[in-house]
């Protein structure tokens, strides 16, 4: 008598509704995921410098080399980043906490007194970053209350031996002792 395969395990039905949680609960839970800290920079079509602190950075693909980051649809920088042909993602070093705080403020010239140079594509590259990814603004995707920017990396470099700035639970960390 031939053996038959065991029956497939039953897949439980999806719950009809998820347990309720507040936006604060969601945000606090997301804060438990430690991230690096970046400053995304670009030069707007009118020549203005754009820059903001972001921790929504992630790799997408090695071939082609793609990365992503996201920006709130309500950001005053949105039009400039949407129309910029290129941008740079500057991964901050542990000693750049003040820059992270500066580029998260509103109503100031974020570049005042900041050491930077024009990258290969013209986007500002911040001196002392742990790593920099210079990207072509390849695509943008609207999801929820954010736009996801996918960048094709044209050039990257890193600062060997530099410790990264880390964000976790609403706080910056600069010492990663093991």
Image (cartoon, helix red, strand yellow):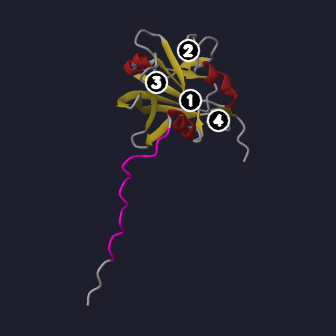
Residue 16: percent from left, percent from top? 36, 49
Few, some or many residues within 10 Å of mark 1 (<14, 14–19, 20+): many
The Cα–Cα distance between marks 2 and 3, rounded to whole angstroms, is: 20 Å
Q: Which residue is mark 3?
A: 87
Asked whether 52 or 113 is in front, the reply is 52
- Give me the C-alpha separation between circle 2 and circle 1: 17 Å
Chain-order first, disc 2 or disc 4: 2
Q: Is residue 46 above or below residue 91?
A: above
For residue 115, above or below residue 152: above
Tell me residue 38's x, y (percent): 56, 29
Please name the residue that numbered disc 1 is placed on: 38
- Can the viewer see residue 56? no
For label 2, the SS is: loop
- Between 170 and 153, the residue placed more toward the observer is 170
Please say whether residue 20 is one of the residues in the magenta stretch.
yes
* Residue 89 image position (x, y, % from top left): 51, 28
User: How many residues crowd around disc 3 within 10 Å: few (fewer than 14), some, or many (20 or more)?
Assistant: many
Q: Earlier in the sequence, mark 4 or mark 3?
A: 3
Of the residues tagged 2 and 1, which is closer to the observer?
2
Mark closer to the chain start, 1 or 3: 1
Residue density around tag 2, few if under 14, some if 14–19, many if 20 or more, within 10 Å: few
- Residue picked out by circle 4: 164
Residue drawn at (39%, 40%) of the image: 64
Whether the residues at callouts 2 and 4 have beta carbons within 8 Å, the answer is no
Where does residue 42 sit, x and y in percent of width and height? 47, 19
User: What is the span of residues highlighted in magenta in the rendered image?
Assistant: 6-21
């Amino acid at each position: 008598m031939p053996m038959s395969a065991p029956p497939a395990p039953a897949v439980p039905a999806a719950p009809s509704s998820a347990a309720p949680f507040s936006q604060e609960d969601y945000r606090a839970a997301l804060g438990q995921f430690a991230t690096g800290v970046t400053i995304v920079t670009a030069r707007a079509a009118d020549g203005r410098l754009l820059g903001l602190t972001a921790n929504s950075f992630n790799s997408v693909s090695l071939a082609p080399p793609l990365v992503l980051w996201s920006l709130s649809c309500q950001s005053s920088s949105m039009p400039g980043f949407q129309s910029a042909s290129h941008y740079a993602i500057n991964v901050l070093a542990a000693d750049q906490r003040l820059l992270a705080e500066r580029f998260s403020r509103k109503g100031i010239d974020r570049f005042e007194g900041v050491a930077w140079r024009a990258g290969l594509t013209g986007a500002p590259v911040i001196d002392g970053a742990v790593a920099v990814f210079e990207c072509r603004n390849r695509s943008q995707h609207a999801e929820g209350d954010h736009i996801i920017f996918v960048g094709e990396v044209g050039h990257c470099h890193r600062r060997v031996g530099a410790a990264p700035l880390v964000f976790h639970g609403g706080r910056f960390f600069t010492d990663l002792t093991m």
